[in-house]
Amino acid sequence: MPKVKPETLALRREEILRAAENCFARQGFHQTTIQDVIKESGLSAGCIYGHFASKDELIQAISDSRHGRDSTLFAAGGDTDDPLQGLRAVARAFLGDLQKEAGLQARRVGLQLWAEALRDDVIREQVASGIRQPIALIAEMLRRGQKRGVIHRTVQPRGAARAIVAMFQGIVLQRLWGESISTSEAMQVFETFLAGLAAKR
């Protein structure tokens, strides 16, 4: 039997994850079966089980892969030395992603992962890690801003970073519940928050 190339295996794995994410976004974790994923992907049961031994493994793999998407969004703020401009870029990227169907689908699955984290230690650590990373990135941006005199010296970078991430999480919840979120209105409120962080001139 010919050996399957590693790149082919990686592509097949991504294909399975996309199919599983479609099912999970549509039906939820607990209503979705491996048979649903097989049907959605068009692949054989042997192929699916060759990559993932169980539905729990699929859920954990999707949880792990979510960090790549979020890292890309938060990287939008890394192209400038000005932390306020960087945070604006992050907010615009994040809010823009919520207006796309692919972004909404990822958040639907993400919301289920938050709930799953209450019962699954592996997923809880993945979810917690996914929150720690943006908090650390934003906190570092704010510290750099304090060194440059752009961010007020009394601001606690980690606390402010946690509040920003919590703001984004709240917007996700409202959007997934069907609320209409105006990007311009959200950015206006975010500007008010940033003004409170800025050093007074």
Image: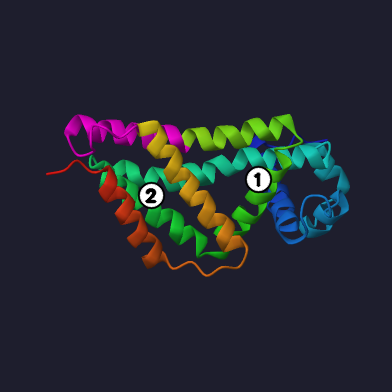
Q: Is residue 156 left or right of residue 200?
A: right
Q: Position of residue 178 (x, y in %)?
A: 60, 68
**Quarter containing the N terminus:** top right
- Asked whether residue 102 is in view, the answer is no
Q: Which residue is mark 1?
A: 11
The residue at 35%/55% (across/down) is 190
Residue 95 in percent (x, y) is at 45, 59
Q: Secondary structure at mark 2?
A: helix
Q: CA distance from mark 1 to mark 2?
A: 29 Å
**Residue at 72% across, 30% down:** 121
Q: Position of residue 14 (x, y in %)?
A: 66, 46
Q: Which mark is residue 90?
A: 2
Q: State the mark number for residue 33.
A: none
Q: Assess whether mark 2 and mark 1 are in contact (beta carbons under 8 angstroms).
A: no
Considering the image in quadrants, where does the C terminus appear? Answer: top left
User: Which amino acid, mark 2?
Assistant: Val
Q: Main secondary structure of the magenta part?
A: helix
Could you say whether the residue bearing mark 1 is in a helix, strand or loop?
Answer: helix
Q: Is residue 195 magenta?
A: no
Q: Which residues are magenta?
A: 134-156
- Which-is-in-front pick, marks 1 and 2? 2
**Viewer-side residue, 105 vs 113:** 113
